C-alpha cells in the first residue's frame, strides 16, 4: 500500500474514532496540530506540514490510542525486531536501514551519539557502551544500544522495543517509526 492509500485509510480511521475536529500530539521534540476535517497536520514549532510517512504514524498512533481508550503500560520486557510479527523475514532490510545507519554515523563516536539524542525525550539504559531509551511518543519507548568495539571487534548497535509496542503499531509502522528516529540523529 502506497503512502497515499495508507494516509487516506489513516485519516478515515481517526475520523471514525473521534468527533473532535482538532487534536495535537507530541512526537520526539515537536508537537503536531491535527486538523481532522481539513486533513492537515502541522508542526507546532515551524508550521510546516508533516511528511506523509510521519503523518501516517501520527494518525495510526492517535487512532489506536482512541480505540484502546488508553495505551498499554510498558511491560519492561525488551524484544528484538525479529520477535515482531514478520520481523525475521524483514530483518536484513531493517538492519540495513536502521542499525547500519547508526554504525556508519556514530561507529566509535558514542559521545556524538549521546549528544545527537539530547534534543529528544530519553532515559539512559544500562545496555551496551551507551544505551538510551528514546520516547517518540510518551508511552512508547525504543531502546537503542551502541558498542564502541575494540581492537578485535568492530562497533555494533541494536534496537529493542518494549514488548507492548505491537499492541500499538503494526510491524511496518514500527519500521517507519524507527527510521524516522534514526534519520533525525
Image (cartoon, helix red, strand yellow):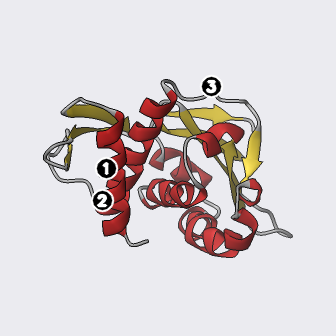
Binning the other alpha carbons within 10 Å of mark 3 as few (below 14), some (14 to 19) or many (20 upward) gives few
The picture places residue 31, in percent across and down from the top left corner, at: 28, 36
In this picture, is 77 found above or below 128?
above
Residue 169 appears left or right of 152: left
In which quadrant of the rendered image does the N terminus lie?
A: bottom left
Nearest the camera: 62 or 108? 62
Element at label 3? loop
Q: Are discs 1 and 2 less than 8 Å apart at CB?
A: yes
Q: Quadrant of residue 91?
A: bottom right
- Is residue 119 among what the camera can see? no
Q: Residues within 10 Å of mark 2 (few under 14, many from 20)?
A: few
Q: Circle 3 sits on which residue?
A: 73
Q: Are marks 3 and 1 in contact (CB under 8 Å)?
A: no
**Residue labelled with disc 2:** 8
**Foreground residue, 141 or 173?**
173
- Expressed as whole percent of the image width and height from the top left, the position of residue 47 reads 13, 46
Give the labeled residue for mark 1: 12
Q: Nearer the viewer, residue 131 or 154?
A: 131
Q: Is residue 87 above or below residue 63?
A: below
Give the quarter of the image for residue 103: bottom right
Q: Is residue 170 left or right of residue 36?
A: right
Secondary structure, mark 1, is helix
Image point (71%, 30%), residue name: 75
> What's the residue at 58%, 38% (across, down)?
141
Amino acid at each position: 500500500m502506497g503512502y497515499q492509500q495508507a494516509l487516506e485509510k489513516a485519516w478515515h480511521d481517526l475520523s471514525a474514532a473521534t468527533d473532535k475536529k482538532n487534536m495535537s500530539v507530541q512526537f520526539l521534540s515537536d508537537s503536531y496540530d491535527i486538523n481532522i476535517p481539513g486533513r492537515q497536520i502541522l508542526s507546532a514549532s515551524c508550521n510546516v506540514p508533516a511528511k506523509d510517512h510521519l503523518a501516517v504514524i501520527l494518525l495510526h498512533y492517535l487512532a489506536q490510542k482512541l480505540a484502546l481508550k488508553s495505551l498499554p503500560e510498558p511491560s519492561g520486557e525488551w524484544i528484538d525486531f525479529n520477535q515482531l510479527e514478520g520481523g525475521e523475514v524483514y530483518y536484513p532490510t531493517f538492519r540495513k536501514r536502521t542499525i547500519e545507519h547508526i554504525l556508519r554515523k556514530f561507529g566509535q563516536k558514542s559521545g556524538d551519539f549521546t549528544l545527537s539524542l539530547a534534543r529528544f525525550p530519553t532515559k539512559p539504559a544500562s545496555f551496551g557502551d551507551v544505551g538510551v531509551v528514546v520516547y517518540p511518543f510518551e508511552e512508547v519507548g525504543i531502546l537503542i544500544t551502541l558498542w564502541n568495539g575494540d581492537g578485535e571487534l568492530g562497533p555494533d548497535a541494536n534496537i529493542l522495543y518494549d514488548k507492548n509496542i505491537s499492541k500499538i503499531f503494526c510491524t511496518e509502522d514500527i519500521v517507519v517509526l524507527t527510521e524516522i528516529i534514526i534519520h533525525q540523529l
